[in-house]
Image (cartoon, rainbow, N blue to C red):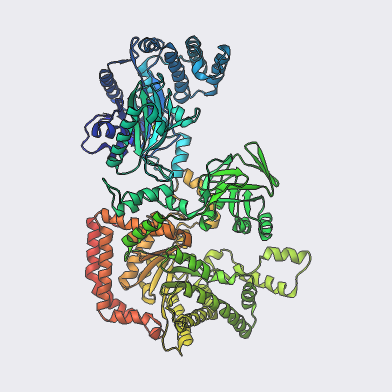
């Protein structure tokens, strides 16, 4: 395989599909040249293969010869020679990886200039000033980028030259002065490097190519890839291209153009250009650019040509493109194109409009595939209404959305101010769990240190709260910070934008998060695609959240955490009374009080989700979480002393203290110790359901037992639940619909899912605990402290708490699903927890056959989109997942048809729940289902994907 391809090489495939090999820039240059026949300066691409070979073992054998051959060809195409003293060829050397990595490596322009060829350039163009300006630019650019010399060293002499010649504008420095500058620059290089500036164009070229290769592993590039989740082993391509000059004269210029507005999505070309300027000048913003429309006035013929090219690009790429172009003495050249980046709003508008326009069209599935979670995130959160803001600090865009509030520097300060009715931004160096009460009340969070997986970032994302993290210029001292020369004191208003990482002094107007009509349209398409394949539920613990979730499109509740109902100020004392109870009577009384309170909550939730399934998890956390901290009480004891009540609390807290509460007495284990607790919860729930039935509602209740590890445990828990159900509904004629299931959140439960399924109507994978227990990571301990280091050093590709670990934890989910269904084909499978709102994880959940995902309400639209994308992806890839799904539903149909399973299903509803032993019918059902499931396995094998 060659290492080098000319832009006009006839590839067998469209070059635009060969980004792996040619890089994005190279692939599109080749596409424009060889497929579209657009005016692109000649050139060639050194492949990513060459870069990978270089990283493995230095400059690859044969690469020099191939580069020389292509340089000779380029020379003959251009009728000029590199380094020629009469009419030299100049080239640019441009990096271009598969994914665009802005700022990773700068491009070297004007390569090929030396002491001889600069004279040739002057003679040919009749413009000495232009020639020496190009030379001095080249030496400093090459010196900085390739030779690693501090760029500032070149600036002082330039300022001096300007001063000496009495001019203020760069463009007015006379030729002689520029020629002298070139000499001075060369001297700087010689002094800094100990060797002279390379004069031979071949050496210059080799140096530049090597510098691009090396830049791939530079710190900047690595950091960028970690952030963008780009693999480190892709390598970059290098493009060598004949120079065209936008800085020749006033019939020349350079610009960037989009085929549609990338901010709003509106039809019509959009962009900027500059007359008499070279590439970087437009982007660098050193000179004021003109809007593209002005090109029409000044160069109407070129404008027309450009618009025709834009139309062709859109038709060809079937999407909005961005471009770089240069005009040299009245001739238009295209220097770059690609499918352009866009805002969320623009992405939605373009995707929907592109299904409907005349000419070319995309399908609805394509439209759905083009939207990303980030796009939706952007439109679901408020943004700065204007980009005309003075940024005093820039940090990581850690959690999307913009917020305005008064700066507070401690969690207590923030909490107090918020209680007094102020909107607050919590500003900390870093946050820890001790700051949570301040984070809860804050509109947004700003930290000076910490990355995208720092505590502040993780917590803020979890809550959908804007956050800017790691804003390094922010120097906090006491109750103020300085940044960008500005001091912000406690109580001063600041604005932050967690989508861009900007921090602004004062109040910036925000646009409301008001999803457009296109948002609704696109998500309705997504829903149609995933219908019957993967449902989306939400995690919610109260009526308003449930209603909100439904508004976002949730099709039920996948996790209602009942402990949240216990933590309210009015409830906590009752819970404590229950824990402290000395006699069964006392305990009973406390439980009764809790029952009444919980029932009211359940009624609200069931009402908000009427007709949709609601999974209620019985109490999960260790009891000591409801008790005050022993430390605090002990301090108080030693100082002011404790009341009788407090003494009892302290004693209880000590009794319930655990070394490792996460894997201590919690979940169903707690139920075993305090069986009255679960019975009370189920009673409250069933009474609520009964009231809903009486009110002509349609409650669909799913009772979920947490942290089960054995069949026996679940069997026992099931009896408490069924007894309580029977008791609570004994007088009802019309019984509410209810099923009983468990969370699968330990490796053992996943592995023995076949046994556990005998006692369960459904499983919900608790992938957060499953991740903790599979890795042996205590999330609260490792995420803040070591996760960043693990990711930076490549020990983990992702934070497994955000994106499921596909091959470890994901494998346990697959095994759990498969084994559970082998016992009970009708077993309903879902997932709750943060992973349920993460697109990559959703893809895995779909592949392994889960029926639904459940996530926080504001992630629901993202989950709806991601579920549809998973369906599309796996249909496109040969339909294996569809086949599995089809086989599974066939299995279920078969199972249902087998009769006994029908009874099993009915039994799952309350009527006979207390008396049913499910194992026998389920086994029959499994037998009935064997055929289709075997077929599913075969299909999966055939598709070459075992999981
Ligand atoms: P980036 O990826 O940072 O945009 P590019 O390789 O596209 O880097 O180049 C930087 C600038 O130099 C762009 O404005 C580009 O148009 C300009 N440029 C690159 N190659 C040439 C060339 N052969 N002739 C003229 N301008 C060029
Ligand atoms: Mg570019
Ligand atoms: Mg759990």
Give the left or right position of residue 566, taking residue 122 as reference: right
Q: Residue furthest bottom?
A: 731
The x and y percentages for residue 283 are: 46, 31
Quarter of the picture holding the N terminus: top left
Residue 27 visible: no
278 relative to 383 in the view: left or right: left
* Residue at image location 61% in from the left, 58% down from the top: 441
Where residue 66 sits: x, y (%)? 27, 24
Q: For the view shown, which residue lies furthest in the right direction?
A: 640
- Residue 635 visible in the shown view: yes
Count of residue discs: 0
Give how far across and how far down residue 175 sits, in percent.
47, 11
Percent of width and height locating residue 724: 48, 83
Quarter of the image that includes the C terminus: bottom left
Q: Who is closer to the viewer here, 637 or 220?
A: 220
User: Image height check: is 779 above or below 795?
Assistant: below
Q: Judge from the rendering whether residue 919 lies leftward or rightward of residue 635; answer left or right.
A: left
Would you identify the image quadrant in which residue 906 lies?
bottom left
Q: Residue at x 42, y 11 (%)?
A: 128
Q: Please tell me which residue lies in front, 740 or 482.
A: 482
Is 746 above or below relative to 58?
Answer: below
> Splitting the image into four quadrants, where does ligand 2 fall?
top left
Along the line of sight, the residue nearer the viewer: 298 or 140 = 298
Up the image or down, 581 lies above or below 411; here it is below
Taking the image as shown, residue 882 lies to the left or right of residue 681, namely: left
């Amino acid at each position: 395989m060659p290492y080098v391809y000319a832009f006009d090489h006839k590839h067998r495939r469209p070059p635009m599909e060969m980004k792996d090999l040619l890089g994005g820039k190279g692939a599109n240059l080749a596409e424009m040249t060889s497929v579209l026949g657009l005016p692109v300066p000649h050139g060639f691409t050194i492949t990513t293969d060459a870069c990978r070979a270089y990283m493995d073992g230095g400059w690859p054998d044969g690469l020099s010869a191939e580069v020389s051959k292509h340089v000779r060809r380029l020379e003959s195409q251009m009728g000029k020679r590199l380094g020629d003293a009469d009419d030299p060829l100049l080239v640019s050397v441009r990096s271009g990886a598969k994914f665009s990595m802005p700022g990773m490596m700068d491009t070297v322009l004007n390569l090929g200039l030396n002491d001889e060829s600069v004279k040739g350039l002057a003679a040919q163009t009749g413009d000495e000033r232009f020639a020496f300006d190009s030379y001095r630019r080249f030496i400093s650019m090459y010196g900085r980028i390739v030779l690693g010399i501090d760029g500032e060293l070149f600036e002082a002499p330039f300022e001096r030259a300007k001063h000496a010649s009495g001019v203020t504008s760069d463009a007015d420095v006379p030729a002689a002065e520029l020629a002298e500058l070139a000499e001075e620059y060369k001297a700087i290089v010689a002094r800094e490097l100990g060797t002279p500036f390379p004069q031979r164009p071949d050496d210059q070229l080799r140096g530049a190519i090597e510098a691009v290769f090396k830049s791939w592993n530079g710190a900047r590039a690595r950091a960028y890839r970690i952030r963008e989740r780009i693999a480190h082993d892709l390598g970059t391509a290098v493009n060598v291209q004949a120079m065209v000059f936008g800085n020749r004269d006033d019939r020349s210029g350079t610009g960037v153009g989009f085929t549609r507005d990338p901010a709003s999505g509106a039809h019509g070309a959009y962009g900027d250009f500059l007359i008499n300027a070279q590439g970087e000048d437009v982007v660098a913003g050193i000179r004021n650019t003109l809007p593209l429309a002005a090109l029409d006035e000044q160069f109407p013929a070129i404008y027309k040509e450009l618009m025709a090219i834009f139309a062709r690009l859109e038709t060809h790429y079937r999407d909005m493109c961005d471009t770089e172009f240069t005009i040299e003495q009245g001739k238009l050249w295209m220097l770059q194109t690609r499918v352009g980046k866009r805002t969320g709003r623009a992405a939605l508008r373009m995707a929907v409009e592109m299904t409907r326009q005349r000419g070319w069209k995309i399908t609805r599935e394509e439209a759905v595939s083009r939207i990303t979670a980030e796009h939706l995130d952007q439109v679901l959160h408020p943004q700065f209404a204007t980009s005309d803001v003075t940024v005093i600090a820039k940090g990581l865009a850690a959690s999307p959305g913009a917020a305005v509030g008064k700066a507070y520097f401690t969690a207590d300060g923030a909490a107090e101010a918020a209680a007094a009715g102020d909107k607050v931004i919590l500003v900390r160096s870093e946050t820890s769990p001790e700051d949570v009460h301040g984070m809860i009340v804050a509109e947004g969070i700003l930290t000076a240190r910490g990355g995208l997986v720092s505590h502040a970032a993780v917590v803020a994302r979890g809550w959908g709260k804007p956050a800017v993290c790691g804003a390094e210029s922010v120097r906090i001292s006491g109750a103020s910070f300085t940044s960008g020369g500005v001091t912000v004191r406690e109580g001063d208003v600041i604005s932050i934008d967690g989508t861009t990482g900007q921090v602004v002094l004062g109040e910036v107007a925000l646009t409301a998060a008001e999803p457009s009509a296109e948002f609704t349209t696109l998500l309705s398409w997504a829903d149609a695609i995933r219908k019957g394949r993967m449902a989306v539920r939400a995690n919610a613990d109260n009526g308003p959240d449930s209603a909100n979730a439904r508004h976002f499109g949730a099709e039920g509740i996948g996790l209602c955490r009942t402990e949240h109902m216990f933590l309210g100020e009015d409830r906590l004392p009752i819970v404590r009374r229950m824990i402290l109870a000395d006699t069964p009577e006392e305990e009973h009384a406390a439980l009764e009080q809790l029952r009444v309170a919980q029932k009211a909550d359940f009624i609200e939730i069931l009402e908000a989700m009427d007709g949709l399934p609601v999974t209620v998890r019985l109490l999960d956390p260790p009891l000591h979480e409801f008790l005050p901290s022993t430390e605090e009480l002990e301090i108080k004891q030693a100082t002011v002393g404790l009341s009788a009540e407090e003494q009892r609390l302290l004693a209880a807290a000590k009794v319930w203290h655990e070394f490792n509460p996460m894997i201590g007495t919690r979940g169903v284990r707690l139920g075993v110790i305090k069986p009255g607790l679960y019975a009370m919860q189920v009673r409250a729930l069933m009474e609520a359901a009964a009231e809903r039935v009486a009110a002509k509602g349609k409650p669909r209740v799913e009772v979920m037992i947490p942290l089960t590890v054995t069949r026996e445990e679940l069997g026992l828990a099931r009896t408490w639940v069924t007894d309580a159900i029977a008791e609570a509904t004994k007088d009802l004629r019309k019984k509410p619909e209810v099923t009983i299931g468990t969370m699968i959140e330990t490796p053992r439960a996943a592995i023995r899912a076949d046994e556990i399924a005998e006692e369960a109507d459904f499983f919900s994978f608790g992938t957060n605990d499953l991740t903790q227990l599979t890795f042996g990571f205590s999330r609260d301990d490792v995420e803040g402290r070591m996760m960043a280091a693990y990711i930076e050093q490549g020990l983990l590709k992702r934070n497994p708490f955000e994106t499921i670990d596909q091959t470890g934890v994901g494998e346990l989910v697959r095994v759990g699903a498969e084994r559970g269904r082998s016992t009970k084909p009708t077993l309903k499978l879902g997932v709750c927890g943060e992973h349920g709102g993460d697109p990559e994880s959703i893809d895995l959940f779909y592949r392994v056959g889960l029926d639904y995902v459940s996530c926080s309400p504001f992630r629901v639209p993202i989950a709806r989109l991601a579920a549809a994308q998973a369906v599309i992806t796996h249909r496109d890839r040969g339909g294996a997942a569809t086949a599995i799904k089809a086989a599974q539903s066939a299995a279920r149909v078969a199972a249902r048809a087998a009769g006994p399973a029908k009874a099993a299903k009915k039994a799952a509803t309350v009527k006979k729940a207390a008396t049913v032993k499910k194992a026998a019918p389920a086994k029959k059902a499994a037998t009935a289902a064997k055929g289709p499931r075997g077929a599913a396995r075969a299909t999966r094998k055939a598709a070459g994907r075992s999981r």
